[in-house]
Every structure is written in structure tokens, then in C-alpha cells.
Image: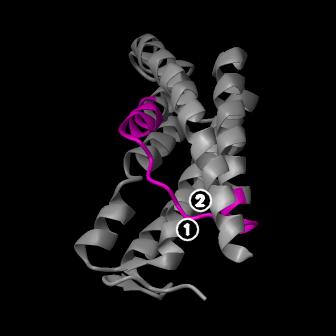
Amino acid sequence: MTTVQPGERDSIATIPNLVTLVRLLCLPIFLYLLFGVENRAAAAWTLGALGATDWVDGYLARRLGQVSEFGKKFDPTVDRLLFIVGLAAILVDGSMPVWFGVAVLVRELVVGGAVAVGTLVYGMERFDVTFLGKTATLLLMFAIPGFLLGASDFPGAGGFQIASWILGVPGLVLSYYTAMVYVPQIRDGIRAARTRSR
């Protein structure tokens, strides 16, 4: 049985969870803009906005005192889904260098998959993302839609392409460095969860 900590709500119907849901529902809009009407610029701005607002739901949860067990799982799950689907879509579109996109995708699937298995299968407790991990995610969240915008007919597209490389390469390096930090933490978390369940 899950124990709700002081200051937390055991509820799904909260404003932060609604914000997270709205962000999730914007994903089909991004895909429609990219593949339905083939408007790379609009799709890039939409994805960029979704990435830039990933802090809003967490901030509201703390500010309004509406932190919930559901939200603590729902928010990061939606963040990862938006990131991975957006990345995969841009790869399919051909707006991003394949090697770069695949490198980011492999890292996300390995770390995200390990966290999902640890949490859902073994009941692993959630661990805090490091500052470097947040920095890597932020850099990539701007670089990825930047590649898409750089491949569009938006004014100054070439500048966005250059900016994406400037942000994306350090973001990719940091993401793999933090992956090496997270993997032992995930392993230890799974071991601790299995010990508690015995």
C-alpha cells in the first residue's frame, strides 16, 4: 500500500495533472503539423513549446500544494513520451542527422526503459535527476526542434541549424555521461526494492 507523504494528495484530479494531460494531447497536433500538412516550422515551434513548458506542471504542483503520487509518475512519463515521439518523428522526417538522432534515442530508450522496468515491475523508488541530467535534457529539448526548424522555410533557418549543433553536441555528451551515473543508481534501486518485497 502506498503511503501519501505530508503535503501530497492521493488524487488524479489536480490542476498540474490537467496541465500534463493538455501537453500530452498536443502531441497529435505536432504530428499532424509535421506529417499531415507538412509544416515543419509550425511543428518545430509546437514541439519547442512543449519542451519549454515541461517545468510548469511540477511548479504548479509544488506551488498549489497539489503534489500527488499519480502526478509524480504521470509527469515524467509524459515528458519522456513527448521527447521520444518528437525525436522519432523528426528522424522519420529526415530533418535531423541520423547518427545524432539514433544516439539520443538509444540513450533515452535504455535509461527510460530501465527506469520503467524498475518502477513498474519491481516498485523501485523514484530517484532525483541530477543537475547535469536536467542540463542535458534542456539542451536537447531546444536542439531537436531546432534541427526541424533549420530544415524548414522559416526565415533564418540556417541560424537555427547552427544553434542546434552548438546546443545538441554538448547535450548529447552530457546525456551519456549522466546515463553512466544513473545506471548504477537504477541497479541499486531495483536491488533495494526486491529486498523490501521479500
For residue 59, above or below residue 106? below
Q: 173 or 37, which is in the foreground?
A: 173
Q: Is residue 124 left or right of residue 150?
A: right
| Amino acid type indicated by mark 1 | Phe
For residue 94, above or below residue 141? above
Q: Quadrant of residue 142?
A: top left
Tell me the number on the disc at residue 74.
1
Under circle 2, the secondary element is helix
Q: Is residue 26 visible?
A: no
Write down the region rendered in magenta.
118-139
| Residue 94: % across, % down | 71, 22
Tell me the number on the disc at residue 23.
none
Q: Residue at horizontal 53%, vertical 61%?
A: 126
Q: 160 or 117, which is in the foreground?
A: 117
Q: How is the image coloured?
A: one colour
| Amino acid type indicated by mark 2 | Thr
Q: Residues within 10 Å of mark 1 (few under 14, many from 20)?
A: some
The residue that disc 2 covers is 77
Q: Is residue 134 magenta?
A: yes
